[in-house]
Amino acid sequence: MHRQRKKLNLDSQNKILNFILQMENIPENYVIEDFPGYLRVNAHSINGVLYAARDFEEVYLVNVMKPGVFPDFVEEFVND
């Protein structure tokens, strides 16, 4: 079963920092996971986001409590 998630493009320090700063204002529980969903980090964690952006081949955002619901700002990071 595939979770509803958004593929993110966090390929620069500026994008990573901007993502982290905007996630600080979001109260919901989000994680960032790799393609198969085996590796997951807290999307509110600076170290977690940095680790995922560096080590995951692909990066996906998942809303743990409300599947498919994402903040509007996420669209600027979506990988088309």
Image (tube, rainbow, N blue to C red):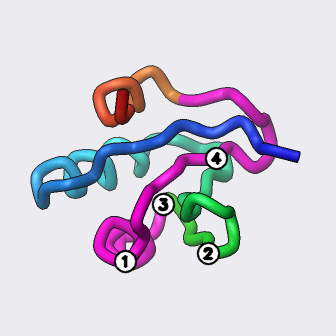
What's the mark number on residue 55?
1
**Residue 48 within the segment the image draws in magenta:** yes
Question: Mark 1 and mark 4: span between their CA atoms?
Answer: 18 Å
- Looking at the rendered structure, the kind of residue marked 4 is Val
Q: Quick check: 40 left or right of 72? A: right
Q: Nearer the viewer, mark 3 or mark 2?
A: 2
Nearer to us of marks 1 and 4 is 1
Residue 4 image-quadrant placement: top right
Q: Are marks 1 and 2 in contact (CB under 8 Å)?
A: yes
Image x and y of residue 36, in percent? 66, 63
Which kind of residue does numbered mark 3 sit on?
His
Nearest the viewer among 9 and 41 is 9
Marks 3 and 2, Cα distance to the nearest angstrom? 15 Å
For disc 1, the neighbor class at 10 Å (few under 14, some 14 to 19, many from 20) is few
Instruction: Please state the extent of the stretch shown in magenta in the rendering.
Output: 44-70
Instruction: Measure how far apart labels 1 and 2 are at the Cα level.
Output: 10 Å
Q: Residue furthest right?
A: 1
Q: Which of the numbered marks, if any, corresponds to residue 62? A: 4
Is disc 3 surrounded by few (<14), some (14 to 19) or many (20+) residues within 10 Å?
many
Local secondary structure at mark 1: helix
Q: Secondary structure at mark 2?
A: loop
Label 4 with label 3: CB-CB less than 8 Å: no
Residue at label 3? 44
Q: Which residue is mark 2?
A: 39
Label 4: which secondary element = strand
What is the three-letter code of the residue carrying label 2? Leu
